[in-house]
Structure formats: C-alpha cells, structure tokens
Amino acid sequence: MAFDCYCALCGVGFCGMHIEAPSETATERRRRWIEKRCRALQAGRDIGQVSEGEETEDPVRSYDPRIVGWDNISWLYKAHCLGWNESAPAGTSKAFISDEGYYADSGELVVKARSDRDRPRSQRVFSCYGHGSEEAPGPVLPFHWCCFEILTRTLTGASDTENVNMDVLYNVMTPLCNMSSSALQLSYGNDVERAQGRYWECIPGAEYCATHPTNTPGIDEYIQTALETNSGLKTSSAELNLRGRDPTSPFGRLPLEIVYQICMFLPGDAVKALGQASLSIHLVTQDNLFWKKFMQRDMPWLWELQGAKSRKIPQDVNFKRLYMWLNRITAPRYGMDDVKLIGVANRRRIWGVCEELADRYHESLPQPTVSG
Ligand SMILES: [Zn+2]
C-alpha cells in the first residue's frame, strides 16, 4: 500500500507539495476558503468541522503561489535518516546518519551511494519507522537536514552537528514511534497534524509549515525597520505611581533577586499577567535589562536577534514591548501570509518539537565523569 512518511522533527512530508498556478480567480477562491476557516477557528471550532454542506466551491488543495515557491519549498524533498548499525566497530557510534536521499513511497527512503568502487550497490533503501530493512534493522527516522540543524542547536546550544551524541539521540527517538507510525509521537502543531493523512495534504492557509525554516532572509530587515520606525516599540512604560501602596503579595516577601529568577523561568504571557496581578512582579519586570535577558532566554530560536551584536538597537526601544511584539508576529498560526515571517514561525514551531526531544536527550546523556 502506498503512503507518505513524515519528518521526525518537523512532521512535514518529503514529497507531494502542490503550488497552485497563479490566477486571479484562484486567489479570490483561496481567500474565501481561508477566511471561512479563520472564522471557524475564532469561533472555537476546528477547521475540519467546516463541513462539505457549508462548502459551495471545490476544495482548494494546494499552496498559495504568492507565499511559497520552489525556492523555499524544495528543501522538503531532500531526506536523510538516523539509523542503527549493529555491526559498527566497537568504540564507534552505532547510530548513523545517512547521506542525502529521497522519499520513494510506502515508507522507503532511497539514498544513492557515493561513487565508490569498493561498494557494488548503487543505492541503499531504508525503511522509515517500521521494521527496518537489510540496510538497517530496526526503525530509521527520516528528517530534513535543516530540521536536524535546528535540533542540533536545541541539543548542544551550537550549530556543529558533530557534537550530537547520535546513539543517545536514536535511543530517545525510537520509543516515540510504533509499527504503524508515519511520524513520531510529538506535538508538531495542529496545522501539521491535520495535513498528515495517508498522503501529505497541502492545506491552504498552512503554508508556513512548509516554508524553509533557516533560510529566512526577510526577517532581519523586517525587525530593523520596525526598530527604527515603529513608535509602539519605543514608548517607555509609564512610571508607576505607588501612592504609598506597599507590595503585599507573597512575592513581596521574597528577596528581589529570587523574584527576578522566578520570572526569568516563566513564559512571557505569564510574566505579563503576573505583573498585572502583583505589584512586586510589576516592579521587578519594569526595567529594560530584565526583558533583554528574558528575550534571550525565551526566544533562542530567533537567532537573528541573539547573535546580532551589530544590530543597531535604538536607545529608546522598550524591550518589554519589543518582546511582546516579536512574540506575537512570530507565533505560528493558521492563515499566516507574510513571506518575511512564515519561515521564522516555522522555525519556532520546529524548535518546540526539538525541545521535547532535548529534554529526553539530556536526561539520557551519560554524565561526564569528574576527575581530579
Ligand atoms: Zn523536517
């Protein structure tokens, strides 16, 4: 039986990406299609609940040519896999990463062997998620290379893929698949899970899921322009007039440094909500330095901001507002259509999946032996 398998890290397929031919009628039909589903989501319904009866038009089953093109979608067709080689020499890693290949069908990943006279076989065929094949017993886990690069950053904090302990990684990933899997049991997001049928479905409005997550040239300029021109990011927080009030919440009894540390480990929305409820928290989180640090900790996937020492951040930028703004514009959501933002939104989504794996990976990593 023919079927698709999906990337273990981002959950998206390796083939079957359809982009609609540009035309005005198609664009208009697509707009109505997405609008209807956005309304359903706002009303707390699922997109899948927009029933056939409500539909007067033929279904749209392709991506928007104004948002995606082959340049930012072709990365999906290049597949690698993580497998296990029982006969690897002692002392070396048994888990291995295959060369680049492509997804054939029915769970099979084909990797053309490099031209090597010692190797008579011209290609190697791996069996994704299932029983394994002659090439590798046990499941192999397919992925896109840039998804693996994102995973490497979540696991090691740096970009060198050589520093990943492949054996540990393989052993934390395989328990998340079963015989009938076509992806791992991880939270890839609603828009991806809806598309993971027997075949990948190109859901209009979910283009961001298929957009290149690391090659995102537009975001730098987008942020820089906003920093310079968006006055909403500059207004400083209104000074709070305590009018003799004394903070009395439980946080008020803790040393400021502890409250600061607690806030640092909360999600952004929680810090904001807590700041509204507790005067102590509000006071601690008033300064720019707090939000600057908070942003670095909470948005590791936004490496344009992390590493950009050269970025000219105007003196009068309010970092709390900057954080809230970035958090909002990069949040993956159905119906996103800004080409400068969809790649980063996808990266943020994939980072979340990789973090689930990173927690398990760090728990399983052999503890370094302390010497001397
Ligand atoms: Zn992927």
Image (tube, rainbow, N blue to C red):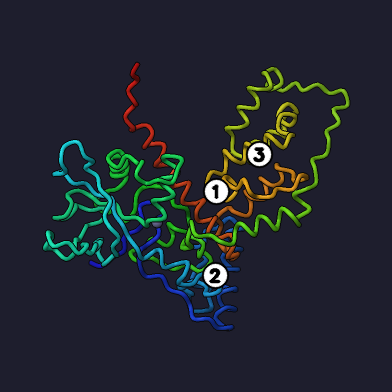
The image shows residue 333 at horizontal and vertical percentages of 56, 57
Is residue 37 something one can see in this rendering?
yes
Residue 67 location in percent, x, y?
54, 70
Q: Is residue 10 above or below residue 241?
A: below
Does the beta carbon of the residue at mark 3 sit less than 8 Å from ligand 1? no
Location of mark 2 (residue): 67
- Residue at point 58%, 52% (across, down): 331
Label 2 Cα neighbours within 10 Å, binned few <14 / some 14-19 / many ≥20: some
Label 3 residue SS? helix
Residue mark closest to the camera, 3 vs 2: 3
Quadrant where the C terminus is found in the figure: top left
Marks 3 and 2, how far apart at CA: 32 Å
Task: Report the front residue among 4 and 372.
Answer: 372
Circle 1 — which element?
helix
First in residue order: circle 1 vs circle 2: 2
- Indicate which quadrant contains ligand 1: bottom left
Report x, y in % for residue 58: 48, 79
| Residue at numbered disc 1 | 303
Q: Amino acid at mark 1?
A: Trp
Q: CA distance from mark 1 to mark 3?
A: 14 Å
Element assignment for label 2:
loop
Asked whether the beta carbons under mark 1 and mark 3 sit within 8 Å of each other, the answer is no
Binning the other alpha carbons within 10 Å of mark 1 as few (below 14), some (14 to 19) or many (20 upward) gives few
The mark closer to the camera, 1 or 2, is 1
- The answer to the question of whether label 1 and label 2 lie on touching residues, with beta carbons closer than 8 A, is no
Query: Residue at image x 47%, y 66%?
Result: 72
Q: Residue at x 21, y 58 (%)?
A: 126
Badge 3 is on which residue? 292
